[in-house]
Image: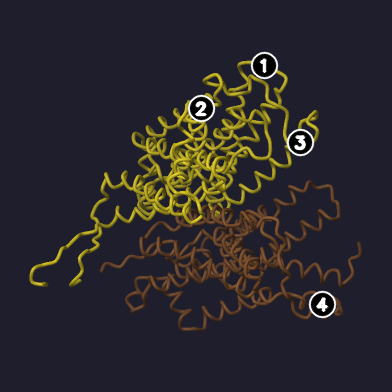
Chain colours: A yellow, B brown
Amino acid sequence: MEGKLIKIVKRDDISKSVFFLTPILAIILTLISGGLIFYLLGFKPLEALKFFFIVPINNVYGFSELLLKATPLCLIAIGLSFCFKSNNWNIGAEGQLTFGGIVSGGVALLFYNQEGFYILPLVVLAGAVGGMIYAMIPAILKTHFNTNEILVSLMLVYVSKLLLDYLVVGPWSNPEGFNFPETRQFSNSARMPILFEGLRIHAGIFIALATVIISWFVFYKTYLGFQMKVSGFSLKTAKYAGYKGKTMILLVFMISGACAGLAGVGEITGPIGQLHREISPDYGFTAIIVAFLGRLNPIGIIFASLVVALTYLGAETAQIFMQIPKYTGQVFQGMILFFLLASDYLLFFKIKFLGIKKNEL
Amino acid sequence: MSFDISFIGVVIASIMASSVPLILAASGELITERSGVLNLGVEGMMIIGAISGFALMIVTGNLFIAIIGSMFAGVIISTIFGFLTQTLLTNHVATGLALTIFGIGMSAMLGKNFVGIPGKEFPVFFDNLSESIPFFGPILFGHSIVFYFAFILPFLTNYFLKKTKIGLMVRAVGDSPDSASNQGINVNLVRYLCILYGGAMCGLAGAYLSMIYTPQWIENMTGGRGWIALALVVFSTWNPIKILIGAMIFGGITILQLHMQALGLRIPVQFLSALPYIMTIIVLVVISRDSRKIKLSTPSSLGKSFYKEK
């Protein structure tokens, strides 16, 4: 290694501060590359970034929209972190969200012309159970037939979206709806209460916050959390320690499916108020990024969901004001994950500046 | 509707045509996985190939440049994956997912001005023979060069892995990177090249969709084919020849589904469209049930990073 100014050394232990600082580094690098992409597309980079990241939230309405979009992302990402922590790759949260939405929407439609305090709890419960059942398909196929959960959970996303499409076009379509692909409006008792007059932010945010607190407790204060952590580090160790691997796989999938289902409930009983073809702008996939950006830590995930929700809002705003294509949001999301993974290098390796020794000069 | 022999020939030909992108992408991914790298970015690389090929075809008017360009685009985007997983030792699954999300967004951004433009006609071979010979005519003739390439590729891949020295190296790196490294093989270099090759094949698969099969640019036009290609690699138990069989089954379901719709069967369209995805799950379950067989044929180091202390 003569003549080299830097040397890369493997770290003996993972540095806590670097662990939580690298996500910030990733966001900064994403902003810089984003500016570069805007420049290449022929936009003024700073102005574009301003419309993307500042304008959308410089008023109360904008900020409430940010919370509205962060809510499902946070919920799903919390659920996914149960899976990811324990080395289970559930990437079909979008399907679990959709199926949860279908089941809870079905219950809401049963009561479309009724009011009553019991309706909303039933609808919420139905969504959670729907998502849970849908997530159990890849889990059971994994535990009993050794089937790859990545591919199964993903294939089920397409299936659930086609099922939703079938229902809103066919049997569940609004009889007075002039053949639009949508169901009846839900009754007011099946809608999430709106928190502030004139804003769209609804009570679903409390479900997300409750999930954050519960998951924090499970992760760091329970035996299950410890088992998940061990299985995440090494499946062999987990087996050696005698953990019931199959039960845990089922459990983490059920939890993450229920969370995704609840996110679906929040969307259809909150801002949408009925079922139609597109109940989620790929929240289920984007939440994967949120989970990683938040370091699979409940508190981290809150911040990460706000950052990623901003890319949704920013893409909309930038499209309206600067005619920047709305897919830029997705490009940003992909880049955040790239940079985050890349900056993980700093976690495991140290860059040492050796300097030039006198005798070498 | 008549079910005579030449009609069956036409159906088989259309099944083969719809399996081409699956064969190309799965064969590419197979080489990547054989070297021990799990790249879940197939869908993203395919869609980037699709828009690059289509855009180059419209802009340059040269089909050759467009095809080569789509492969090159696949190589470029897979370089990101290679750099992250091989040099920076990132998690393969997460990096592959990022690649897919990024690829879909990027392709929609690049393709904004190409929506709704009709593609150019792609030259086919012996079109006259295709119509004059019953049954074999439509199967053997009247196809593009990419079509023929796709059906030769699994055999080439098989030969490469089994009979060539470099193929042996790829397998050694995938099955036991440590001993391969001790033999003096540059593990990371081999893996880099396999990743780039996989990218090129996925790019070509995408270009086939946008330039020959459809031919036009539609957002998200790969529609999960990349994921089905990944499932095909598992289905094949990492054997290139079996990719051919698997791809024909999936192509068959896709075409069957279209014909059933055309026949006006009273099954909802959405259920038929869901068939390929449901079938993928069923096939995966059947294949994976025998966990010993899967374990024996999976490249041992699949998805694990290789780090050599310097």
Judging from the image, mark 4 belongs to the subunit labelled B
Q: Is residue B268 left or right of residue A3?
A: right
Question: Same subunit under labels 4 and 1?
Answer: no
Query: Is A146 placed left or right of A296 in the picture?
Result: right
Label 3–label 2 contact, CB within 8 A: no
Q: Position of residue B10 (x, y in %)?
A: 81, 70
Q: Residue at x 58, y 35 (%)?
A: A264
Residue at the (73%, 70%) spot, across then down:
B121
Q: CA distance from mark 1 to mark 2?
A: 29 Å
Determine whether the residue tagged by mark 1 lies in a helix, strand or loop.
loop
Chain-order first, disc 1 or disc 2 = 2
Kindly identify which residue carries mark 2: A61
Asked whether the beta carbons under mark 4 and mark 2 sit within 8 Å of each other, the answer is no
- Nearer to me, A299 or B246: A299
In the rendered view, would you say A221 is above or below B173? above
- Position of residue A277 relative to residue A359, above or below, is above
Marks 3 and 2, the one that precedes in the sequence: 2
Q: Which residue is mark 4?
A: B130
Q: Nearer the viewer, residue A203 or A24?
A: A24
Mark 3, residue position = A180
SS of the residue under disc 3: loop
Instruction: Calculate the distance from the C-alpha at mark 4 to the C-alpha at mark 1.
Output: 66 Å
Tell me which chain the residue with mark 2 is part of: A
Q: Is the C terminus of chain A in the top left, top right, bottom left or bottom right quadrant?
A: bottom left
First-in-chain label (1 vs 3): 1
Q: Which mark is residue A115?
A: 1
Are labels 1 and 3 assigned to the same chain? yes
Q: Is residue B59 above or below residue A270?
A: below
